[in-house]
Amino acid sequence: MRTKVQWASAIALAATVLATLFGAQGSGAAASDMLPVPAQQESAVTFVSEPVVQAVASDNGERATDDTTAQEGVEENSDVASLAELVAEQDMPGTLSREMRCLAGAIYFEARGETLEGQLAVGRVIINRAASEKFPDSYCGVVLQRSQFSFVRGHAMPSVREHSASWQQAVAIAQIARDGSWKSPAKGALFFHATRVSPNWRLTRVGRIDNHIFYR
C-alpha cells in the first residue's frame, strides 16, 4: 500500500513539473513577439540660412554691390530733393577708370535721351550683375559679355562724344549708381529689354521705366 502511494505521488510530481515546463516555454515566445524594438535615435538636422552680401572688387579697386547693399542708408545720405539735383552736384573726373567708362558707356548707349531714373535703372542693372555670381564680376565684364548688349560690336563699345552733355550726364549717373546714393526705381533688377520686343522671359517683372522693362 505504501508503495502504491509513493508511486502515485511520484507520478503527480512528474506531471506538475512537465506542466510547468511547457507552460513557461509558450508564454516566453509570445512575450518576445510583443516586445517593442527600440528605434535608432537620429540627431535632428538643423539648417541655418543667413543672407550674405559680398561686395565684388573690380580691377581698379572699386567695389560693386547689389541694390540691397547699395540702398542701405540712401535716405540718410541724400540731402537733395531730386535726382536731377544730385546729378548736378557730381564732379566730372579728369580721367575715368576703365570700369567706370564701361558703366557710363552702357548708360550712354542704352538709355541716352531717357529720364534720369531710366538711366539710373540701367546703371544699377550693370552693377547688380557684377555683384551676382551669374555674371562676370566687373562692369566691363558685364557690359562686354557676348550677346548681352546690342551696342557692343566686336567685344568693344563705339566711340563716345565725350564733350556732349549726354556723356557728362551718363558719367554722373554712373557715379550715383556706383555709390548707391539714390534709390533705383527698378530695385534688384538683373535683366531688361526694350519695350519694342517681347522675349517672353520667365522672370519676375520689376516694372517699366521709359522704354525698358526690368526683371529680376
Image (cartoon, grey):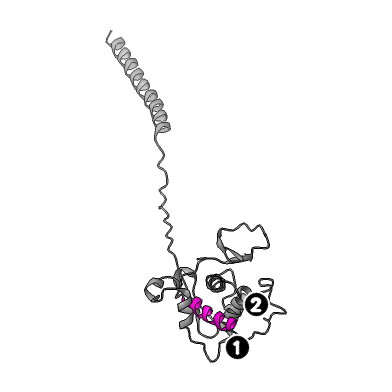
Please name the residue that numbered disc 2 is placed on.
Answer: 144
Q: Helix, strand, or loop for circle 2?
A: loop
**75 left or right of 155 in image:** left
Q: Is residue 167 magenta?
A: yes
**Furthest residue in direction bottom, as rendered:** 94
Chief SS of the magenta region: helix
Give the image location of residue 5, x and y in percent: 28, 11
- Magenta segment boundaries in residue numbering: 165-179
Image quadrant where residue 98 sits:
bottom right
**Furthest residue in direction right, as rendered:** 154
Q: Is residue 213 visible?
A: yes
Q: Amino acid at mark 2?
A: Leu
- Look at the picture and state if 69 lies above or below 62: above
Please name the residue that numbered disc 1 is placed on.
Answer: 163
Instruction: Bin the neighbour count of mark 1 within 10 Å (Cα to Cα): few under 14, some 14-19, many 20 and up.
Output: few
Image quadrant where residue 216 sits:
bottom right
